[in-house]
Image: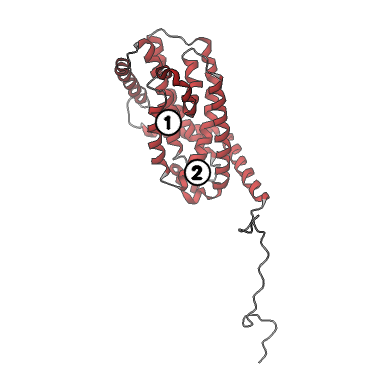
């Protein structure tokens, strides 16, 4: 019995699949270079569009702070008061333990704690939740993902500005003036801003995909706090101070902390900080370009 030539349902014949380009060792499909470039281009476009909406990001960041302290009489100034009490008590205790002069130690401690607690550490921990905290927004509003990174940066920046009052008061009490060297802190803070956006994109994507990363980051930051000269000074390790350059957080702190103390950061600190920033930016662009299309599903 013959089967009609117009039907292939019962013939057992299957059309051959189109050829697929194999990898260099025949291991699997080879992703085309244009597709990779398109991901990077779309990620760069997202970043550029996000920066154009910086006013929206600043408004959202300020709204987060207002909601956090809604109903409070002092509002965000509770941050300033809490930090002042902590620095004052730590200065009195550790100056006795380390046998240091309070007038020299307290200004160093105050600026170090502010830069670490409300600067680097707070930003790194907050960046882990950049996208997961904005789940409803990402699923319902069409806007660049970079806006959420800028939102996190703005929120941390506002908290930082409120706490910066504490070292200023400490410097005034002890009659300390950093002089013209404080201007050197401006390019360092600008470098921090670039790093903060890169961190939000990098850790925000990674933590949206793997939810075990935030507690790991929190534990690591506690360890780094004790091995970084924050409550102790580099001169206390005497001839082994050069080992501190293997701690990248030390250099990032130094380029901002030294100008506030009326000193000039070393060229090595600037070189290490610049290298870290380049690595952060490239790694953030790679991860963000690969994760951008999946973020709405991960959160």
Q: Residue at x 46, y 46 (%)?
A: 208
Please name whichever residue, 223 or 296, is drawn nearer the observer in this view of the structure: 223
Q: Give above or below for 15 relative to 191.
A: below
Q: Which quadrant would residue 110 be assigned to in this image? A: top left
Q: Which mark is residue 205?
A: 2
Q: Note whether residue 255 is visible.
A: yes
Q: At x 54% / y 31%, what residue is drawn?
A: 276
Residue 81 vertical position relative to residue 207 in the rendered view, above or below: above
Mark before the other along the chain sequence, 2 or 1: 1
Residue 34 position in % (x across, y down):
68, 49
Circle 1 residue = 121
Which residue occupies the extreme bottom position in the image? 1
Q: Looking at the picture, does residue 123 appear above or below residue 107?
A: below
Crowd class of label 2 (few under 14; some 14 to 19; many from 20; radius 10 Å) = many
- The crowd level at tag 1 (other Cα within 10 Å; few <14, some 14-19, many 20+) is many
Q: Considering the numbered disc 2 on the image, is that residue within a helix, a strand or a loop?
A: helix
Q: Position of residue 117 (x, y in %)?
A: 40, 27
């Amino acid at each position: 019995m013959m089967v009609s030539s117009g039907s292939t349902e019962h013939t057992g014949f299957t059309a051959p699949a189109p050829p697929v380009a194999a990898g260099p060792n025949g291991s699997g499909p080879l992703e085309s270079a244009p597709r990779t470039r398109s991901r990077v281009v779309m990620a760069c476009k997202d970043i550029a569009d996000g920066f154009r909406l910086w006013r929206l990001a600043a408004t959202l960041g300020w709204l987060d702070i207002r909601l956090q302290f809604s109903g409070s009489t002092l509002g965000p100034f509770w941050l300033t008061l809490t930090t002042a009490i902590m620095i004052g008590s730590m200065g009195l205790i550790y100056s006795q333990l380390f046998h240091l002069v309070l007038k020299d130690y307290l200004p160093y401690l105050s600026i170090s704690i502010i830069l670490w607690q409300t600067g680097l550490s707070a930003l790194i921990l907050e960046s882990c939740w950049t996208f997961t905290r904005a789940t409803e927004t990402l699923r319902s509003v069409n806007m660049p993902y970079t806006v959420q990174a800028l939102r996190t940066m703005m929120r941390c920046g506002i908290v930082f500005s409120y706490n910066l009052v504490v070292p200023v008061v400490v410097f005034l009490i002890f009659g300390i003036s950093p002089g013209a060297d404080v201007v050197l802190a401006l390019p360092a803070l600008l470098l921090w801003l670039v790093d903060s956006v890169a961190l939000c994109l990098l850790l925000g994507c990674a933590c949206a995909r793997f939810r075990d990363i935030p507690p790991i980051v929190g534990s690591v930051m506690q360890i780094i706090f004790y091995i970084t000269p924050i409550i102790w000074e580099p001169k206390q390790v005497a001839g082994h101070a050069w080992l501190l350059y293997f701690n990248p957080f030390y250099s990032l702190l130094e380029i901002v902390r030294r100008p506030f103390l009326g000193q000039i950061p070393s060229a090595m600190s600037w070189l290490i900080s610049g290298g870290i920033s380049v690595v952060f930016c490239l790694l953030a662009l790679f991860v963000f370009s690969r994760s951008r299309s999946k973020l709405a599903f991960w959160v």
